[in-house]
């Protein structure tokens, strides 16, 4: 890979040093492309670390909805917030995206303008400390008991589970197990 194209991701690394890049640029191109020198190895490691961080953030960031705003919480190791915001803007074009990273909220609007606020995403959006669709009351109501039968809806399970079939002579026949329901095995 060309050293100049490596710079796009490598300069976003938290430990990037411009002297390292200049040193790699002054070396033989074949040696740097094959990672034969320690400096080029370090630059390639920086490149792969930053691209790995970006791919992980793109794949595992979960966004919640509040009106026309999608918001979420990320913990980025490197400086890839602008790339992450532009990715989510391309993915959800009609929404404003707000991402919180290290107590700062980065917001990209529908037109592509980026703003940085020194507050959490919940205080930026005017939400409380918990999201409005909290499941705490449901959890305390339905899952306090450790008795499994109270949590299981056996009538619905009997209705939705398919009957067991076997194939005899390439024709399906209903297996009759003397009226035993599938929930009796659970």
Image (cartoon, rainbow, N blue to C red):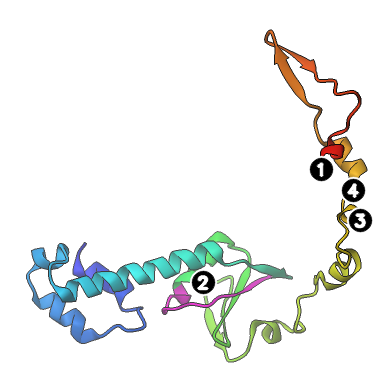
Q: CA distance from mark 4 to mark 2?
A: 43 Å
| Left or right: 40 in relation to 117 | left
Q: Residue at x 85, y 63 (%)?
A: 146
Residue 43 in sight in this render: yes
Looking at the rendering, which quadrant does residue 108 occupy? bottom right
Which of the labelled discs sits on residue 186, or is there none?
1
Closer to the N terminus: mark 1 or mark 4? 4
Q: CA distance from mark 4 to mark 3?
A: 8 Å
Q: Which element carries disc 4, helix, strand or loop? A: loop
Q: CA distance from mark 2 to mark 1?
A: 46 Å
Looking at the rendering, which quadrant does residue 51 occupy? bottom left
Mark 2 crowdedness (10 Å alpha carbons): few <14, some 14-19, many ≥20: many
Q: Quadrant of the N terminus?
A: bottom left
Q: Which residues are magenta?
A: 68-82
Q: Residue at x 70, y 87 (%)?
A: 123
Residue 8 in sight in this render: no
Q: CA distance from mark 1 to mark 4?
A: 12 Å
Residue contact between numbered discs 1 and 4, judged by CB atoms under 8 Å = no
Q: Which residue is mark 3?
A: 150
Q: Which element carries disc 1, helix, strand or loop? A: loop
| Left or right: 3 in relation to 109 | left
Which of the labelled discs sits on residue 153, or is there none?
4
In the image, farthest residue toward the left: 28
- Residue 14 x, y percent position in the rendering: 36, 83
Q: Residue at x 62, y 72 (%)?
A: 96
| Mark 1 vs mark 4: in front | 1
- Residue 172 x, y percent position in the rendering: 74, 15
Residue contact between numbered discs 3 and 1, judged by CB atoms under 8 Å = no
Residue contact between numbered discs 2 and 1, judged by CB atoms under 8 Å = no
| Left or right: 39 in relation to 136 | left
Q: Which residue is mark 2?
A: 85
């Amino acid at each position: 890979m060309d050293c100049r194209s490596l710079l796009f991701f490598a300069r976003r690394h938290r430990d990037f040093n411009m002297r390292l890049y200049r040193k790699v640029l002054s070396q033989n191109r074949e040696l740097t492309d094959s990672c034969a020198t320690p400096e080029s190895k370090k630059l390639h490691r920086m490149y792969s670390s930053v691209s790995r961080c970006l791919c992980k953030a793109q794949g595992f960031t979960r966004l919640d909805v509040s009106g026309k705003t999608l918001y979420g919480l990320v913990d980025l190791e490197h400086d890839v917030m602008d790339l992450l915001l532009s990715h989510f803007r391309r993915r959800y074009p009609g929404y404003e995206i707000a991402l919180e990273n290290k107590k700062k909220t980065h917001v990209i609007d529908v037109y592509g303008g980026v703003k940085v606020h020194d507050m959490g995403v919940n205080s930026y959006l005017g939400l409380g400390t918990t999201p409005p669709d909290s499941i705490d009351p449901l959890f305390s109501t339905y899952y306090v008991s450790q008795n499994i039968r109270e949590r299981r809806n056996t009538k619905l399970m009997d209705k939705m589970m398919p009957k067991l079939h076997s194939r005899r002579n390439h024709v399906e026949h209903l297996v009759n197990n003397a009226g035993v329901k599938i929930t009796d095995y659970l």
